[in-house]
Amino acid sequence: MLEKFSKWKANRAESVPSYTMDAATQAIPKHVAIIMDGNGRWAKQKGLPRIAGHREGMKVVNKIVRKANEVKIDVLTLYAFSTENWKRPKTEVDYLMKLPERFLSMELPKLIEENVQVRLMGSLENLPDHTLRAVMTAVEATKENDGLILNFALNYGSRYEMIKAIKEIATKVEAGLLNTESINEEVLEQHLMTSDLRDPDLLIRTSGEIRLSNFMLWQLAYSEFWFTDVLWPDFTEQHFAEAIAEYQKRARRYGGV
Ligand code: V0D
């Protein structure tokens, strides 16, 4: 299984010129997005509190980030907390909001050393101060890094993102900076939180749910989807390899037509 990873090497610009990497060959996805679902269910199955599942899920984040960097994926977007997650019990939300600090206190030095750039996508206003401080410190400390972009979707919702973009565009029209006629896909994209990122090539969702749950609705319009019943705390580098191998298989199939 692991030997599969060696085949994906050579994707980032520095290793192979992009014209040799057409979709019909070995192209590994440049942007992978993951909905990390099933932490609560994992804990329940083991008779543990839900927070035990989140803690275990955080360890998996670490492993997958390392692997993504190793195989030279350009962007890894992780759905960590949705706008709907505020409806969960307060104790659980409070615990979740401590995870960025926990994760970063252990991993930030390594992320810096590995040239990873940490980014955030979502509305940061409602986050507790301590959470915001931790994530902003990581963003600031890694902003010059040009390796893997590790994009955490925190308090993110796709419909909210689009409404916000539309309001910004409307404001520009009102101010006479933009004509209604010139609004096109590119204009809308420039106002999304992913304006400087390519669209995901591959979406992975764990835990058997076959839906998008308000995640990157615009950006996933042309992406390949890969679903697994595996719960996020049980997700391994091998599962990640499987998803990428499947992506490559599909890319080869289209390439052959
Ligand atoms: C819980 C499984 C890392 C999904 C993974 C606040 C649910 C573990 C982060 C993290 C969460 C976020 C930002 C950052 C560094 C780390 C995280 C949350 C939940 C929600 F800059 N894991 N993680 N954030 N879980």
Image (cartoon, rainbow, N blue to C red):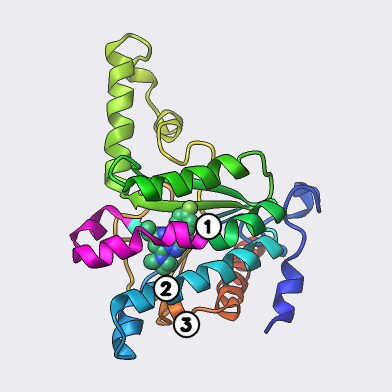
Alpha carbons under labels 1 and 3: distance apart: 22 Å
Query: Which secondary structure, mark 1?
Result: helix
Look at label 2 and name its amino acid.
Answer: Arg
Distance from the alpha carbon under mark 3 to that under mark 2 = 12 Å
Residue situated in front as seen by the camera: 162 or 36: 36
User: Which range of residues does the magenta coloring cover?
Assistant: 82-103
Q: Position of residue 26 (x, y in %)?
A: 71, 65
Q: Is residue 62 above or below residue 133?
A: below
Percent of width and height locating residue 199: 51, 48
Q: Nearer the viewer, residue 144 or 225?
A: 144
Q: Residue at x 39, y 32 (%)?
A: 188
How far apart marks 2 and 1 lie (CA) works out to 13 Å
Q: In this figure, which residue is indicated by the disc labeled 2?
A: 55
> In screen coordinates, is 120 left or right of 163?
right
Residue for point 60% across, 43% down: 141
The residue labelled by disc 1 is: 104
The secondary structure that most of the magenta stretch takes on is: helix
Q: Of the residues shown, which amino acid type is indicated by label 1?
A: Leu
List the residue tagged with mark 3. Answer: 234
Q: Ligand 1 within 8 A of label 2's CB?
A: yes
Label 1 CB sits under 8 Å from any ligand 1 atom: yes
Amino acid of disc 3: Asp
